[in-house]
Amino acid sequence: MREIVLDTETTGFEPGEGDRIVEIGAVELIRHVPTGRTYHQYINPQRSMPAEAFAVHGLGDDFLADKPLFKDIADDFLAFIGDAKLVIHNAAFDMKFLNAELGWVQKPILPMDRALDTLAIARRKFPGSPASLDALCRRFGIDNASRTLHGALLDSEILAEVYLELIGGRQPDFALAAGSNTQTKAGTDQARVGPRPTPLPPRITPEESAAHAAFVDALGDAAVWKKLS
């Protein structure tokens, strides 16, 4: 199963009012494990950066002036995400912007059911508790000290860690992997473990084995180890 953890930075809140995407970051997961493949792109929004948005991500007009337009990176972005599920914190916001940008360059939009919203998951799992990315990092003990400003790739990498915790830890489907034999015991799924086809070689040396045997002999016939041998 392939998933893409994704984040964007923008010039504001509403593409319908002229706001644009200025950065996209994404991290690839295969079966909930990061593969090391990432996507990162700054984008020239073809408009000035409002002071409020600059305070959030620090991406200014001079920095973005020589970056490509969205139309120039759209195909590469779509190729990276492929048909994978998109894991996004507050998915409605990012999907709104991505689909606006895709629509403006006559590319197919992304169905909303492709997005898995970690904000919604967190609110269901911890009702009444703060569910921002920073709050979830504190809850799960995830280091976000380098997040002094928002950044799409850094936030995607942090969100990938948060997502794995939200769904049950680093290997949430360890015992439910496709093709594995499982059995139900006390209401939980547990992997059925069989004997190894070839026993592992002993790690104890002959000298250690002889010393242990001498030690057991010295304990006398009443020793528990004698009865169990």
Image (cartoon, grey):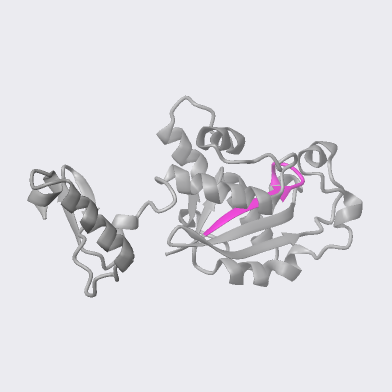
The C terminus sits in image quarter: bottom left
Res 76 → quadrant: bottom right
Residue at point 49%, 47% (across, down): 163
Question: From this viewpoint, is residue 112 visible?
Answer: yes
Question: From this viewpoint, is residue 96 visible?
Answer: no
Residue at point 45%, 43% (across, down): 166
Q: Position of residue 143 (x, y in %)?
A: 61, 41
Would you say 30 lies left or right of 7 here?
A: left
**Outermost residue toward the right in this view:** 62
Would you say 19 lies left or right of 128 here?
A: right
Would you say 19 lies left or right of 38 here?
A: right
Looking at the rendering, the stretch of residues picked out in magenta corresponds to 4-14
Q: Does the magenta run of residues contain 9?
A: yes
Q: Nearer the viewer, residue 90 or 38?
A: 38
Q: Main secondary structure of the magenta part?
A: strand
Q: Does the magenta run of residues contain 168?
A: no
Q: Position of residue 136 (x, y in %)?
A: 54, 36
Q: Position of residue 56 (x, y in %)?
A: 76, 39
**Outermost residue toward the top in this view:** 128
Height in image: 41 above or below 143? below
Residue at point 80%, 65% (across, down): 68
The N terminus sits in image quarter: bottom left
- For the image, the number of numbered tags is 0
Q: Position of residue 205 (x, y in %)?
A: 33, 66
